[in-house]
Amino acid sequence: MVKDFFNIETGQSISVEDNAVLSDFPGYTDVVPPLSKTTEQLRADFRHLRDSLLYYTDTDNAMASDHPDNAALLTFRQKLRDAPQDIPSFELGSGSYFTEWETGKFQEIFSAHAGTIRAGFS
């Protein structure tokens, strides 16, 4: 019987005997490591997510000028447009960049349109 160990950096697998011990293989893991994305891919993913959020908030009920959340939504949309694109690890919906209301709006939109938004990631 054999099992696979995966190189942490490349993700390539090696087949080892079933009784092999992971500690004998430095730089390997027994789970498939996530593939690293390039800085350009992370930036493209960020732009796609930001553009999707802008698209889906464009038709939000809160865009009506008499809606109580109108000002908050307009601020959120401006922050999306101004978000730092030069930071590839920048995460929407977390950290101190967005308010609690904006984080909730991000989560609401992403939950409603997750399949469509995820389909555009590199």
Image (cartoon, rainbow, N blue to C red):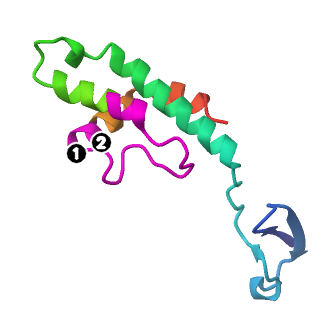
Q: Is residue 45 above or below residue 24?
A: above
Looking at the picture, how far across and down is residue 22, in whole percent?
76, 82
Q: Is residue 22 above or below residue 78?
A: below
* Residue 26 seen in the figure: yes
Looking at the picture, how far across and down is residue 63, in whole percent?
23, 15
Using the rendered view, name the quadrant where residue 68 is placed.
Answer: top left
Q: Which residue is mark 2?
A: 103
- Between marks 2 and 1, how big is the CA–CA gap? 5 Å
Q: Are marks 2 and 1 in contact (CB under 8 Å)?
A: yes
Under mark 2, the amino acid is: Thr
SS under mark 2: helix
User: Image check: 59 left or right of 81?
Assistant: left
Under mark 1, the amino acid is: Glu
Say which of 35 and 21 sits in front.
35
Say which of 47 and 120 sits in front.
47
Residue located 82% across and 88% down the image: 24
User: Image check: 66 left or right of 115?
Assistant: left
Looking at the picture, how far across and down is residue 20, in whole percent?
83, 84
Say which of 13 and 74 sits in front.
74
Looking at the picture, how far across and down is residue 119, in whole percent?
60, 29
Using the rendered view, name the quadrant where residue 57 is placed.
Answer: top left
Report the predominant secondary structure element of the magenta stretch: loop
User: Image check: 116 left or right of 4?
Assistant: left
Q: Which residue is mark 1?
A: 100
52 is within the stretch colored magenta: no
SS under mark 1: helix
Segment colored magenta: 78-104
84 is within the stretch colored magenta: yes
Say which of 81 and 38 sits in front.
81
Quadrant (top left/top right/bottom left/bottom right) for the C terminus: top right
